[in-house]
Image (cartoon, grey):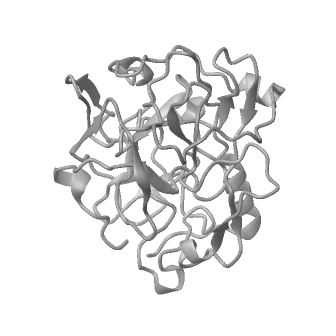
Amino acid sequence: MGMRIPSRSILLLSVLTLITACGGENSAESSAVATDPDVTTDSSVESSTTTEALALVPRDTALPALGECPTAVFPDLGSVAGPGGDYVMPVVTVECSATELVVRSNGMPGYEFVEMTPNGLREQDWDWRVPLMPEVADEPTSIVDVLGPLGFTTTGLPIYGPTEGPMPEREAFGDPVYNGLLDGCGGHTGYNADYHNHALNAVAACNLDSSYIIGYALDGFPIYNSVGCLDVECSESAVFVSGYDMTGDPTSYSWKAYTYDASGKSNVLDECNGRVGPDGTYRYHATTAFPYVIGCLRGTATTQTGNAAAPMPPMG
């Protein structure tokens, strides 16, 4: 792959910097009602309205109602720094039909591009279409070793799973966070010079601090940041955490190195890295630990076209 691997001390620091910001909810949320009887609100949540949580409240706490076009959660990229140099600025458009959210993007980051791979950076042609009223599926869909987009950020960048491609062989299908392959916003470029995220850092520097919702999965369910409300009025909140434990070496085959175990943990997310909120709607949460964004798809992913339907090729 030819990537620069930092020292262990720098690597640990880089993992710590992938701290996701808060994901609150209120009575007007944009995720669909979870009708699956097996999907229940976690009764083990504990209040953690801490200084950290208060500091992570986004600039706009309003959220769209169920089925409403969520244009307000997509930040204005007109004044962002952009990738720098001679690169073009990011362009993202958002519109809705009666049933779909449609997001188009040129795939350019709104912050300085840091070359973490030898693949360079080029404009892309992303066109995502997801349901405005997603439904919980009878069974989750596994994303183990899935290579390619599983969702997109509100800044128009693809979200991939917690695994890399087959090259180099020593790090085949490894955890890109653990292997130190990502920039400070949790992304890097692939073989097609396409910038994408494997983790999300919901802070101003990454242009993900304007809303509690920081992305959408391809099944249509929103991706919140890590702090969620425990009641509809959001009088109490908690930092939600991944239920996965490291039980092997994530250098390669990341999915064999982590095991889901929610026992003894408070505020733990389900195997898909999501939960049912206080209003009975489902959403994912970004976390600092594996799988970072999505662990499986709780709804049914919509069929995409073009680049959004293409698998991620091997890293160069």
Q: Is residue 159 visible?
A: no
Point 55% across, 79% down: residue: 252
Residue 275 drawn above or below residue 141: above
The residue at the point 63 percent across, 40 percent down is 20
Q: Position of residue 186 (x, y in %)?
A: 54, 50
Residue furthest to the left: 306
Task: Give coordinates of residue 93: x percent, y percent.
Answer: 26, 27
Query: Residue 102: which quarter of the image?
Result: top left
- The residue closer to the viewer here, 3 or 173, is 173
Residue 169 left/right relative to 150: right
The one of 189 and 53 positioned closer to us in this rendering: 53
Image x and y of residue 35, in percent: 45, 37
- Residue at 57% x, 16% y is 61
Q: Can you say which quadrant of the picture contains the N terminus? A: bottom left
> Does residue 314 show up?
yes
Q: Residue at x 69, y 27 (%)?
A: 56
User: In screen coordinates, is 62 left or right of 290?
Assistant: left
Image quarter where the C terminus lies is bottom left
Residue 314 horizontal side relative to residue 271, left or right: left
- Using the rendered view, name the quadrant where residue 32 is placed: top left
Q: Nearer the viewer, residue 178 or 3?
A: 178
